[in-house]
Image: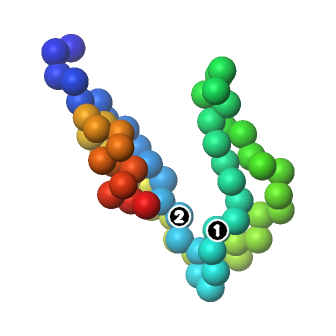
């Protein structure tokens, strides 16, 4: 593949009435999701799967933060 862009998906979350406090990261060795162990208290909100071209990871992150 000569094209240096790759398709990626980012899930965007928006909590109604407050900030998201749960932290989920990727395990540095396996890439598997790792939760911080705190209780999830998001009773209402939205989630959206956003397709992006991953040519510049920094650009993608800045666009959705």
- Residue drawn where x is 47% and y is 59% of the image: 12
Left or right: 18, with 41 as reference point: left
Q: How is the image coloured?
A: rainbow
Query: The residue tagged with tag 1: helix, strand or loop?
Result: loop
- Residue drawn where x is 62% and y is 85% of the image: 17
Instruction: Work out how far the residue at label 1 is from the one at label 2, CA to CA, in angstroms.
Output: 8 Å
Q: Which residue is mark 1?
A: 20
Q: Which residue is mark 2?
A: 13
Depth order, front residue of 23/53: 23
Residue 52 image label: none
Query: The residue tagged with tag 2: helix, strand or loop?
Result: strand
Locate residue 52, reporting x and y percent.
30, 45
Left or right: 22, with 55 as reference point: right
- Sequence-wise, the earlier of marks 1 and 2 is 2
- Residue drawn where x is 21% and y is 14% of the image: 1
> For mark 1, does the 10 Å Cα neighbourhood hold few (<14), some (14 to 19), or many (20 or more) residues?
some
Locate residue 13, reporting x and y percent.
53, 64
Marks 1 and 2 close (CB-CB < 8 Å): yes
- Residue drawn where x is 28% and y is 38% of the image: 56
């Amino acid at each position: 593949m000569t094209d240096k862009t790759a398709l990626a998906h980012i899930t965007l979350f928006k909590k109604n009435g407050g900030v998201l406090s749960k932290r989920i990261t990727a395990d540095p060795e396996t890439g598997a999701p790792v939760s911080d162990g705190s209780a999830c208290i998001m009773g209402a909100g939205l989630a959206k799967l956003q397709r992006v071209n991953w040519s510049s990871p920094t650009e993608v992150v800045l666009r959705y933060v």
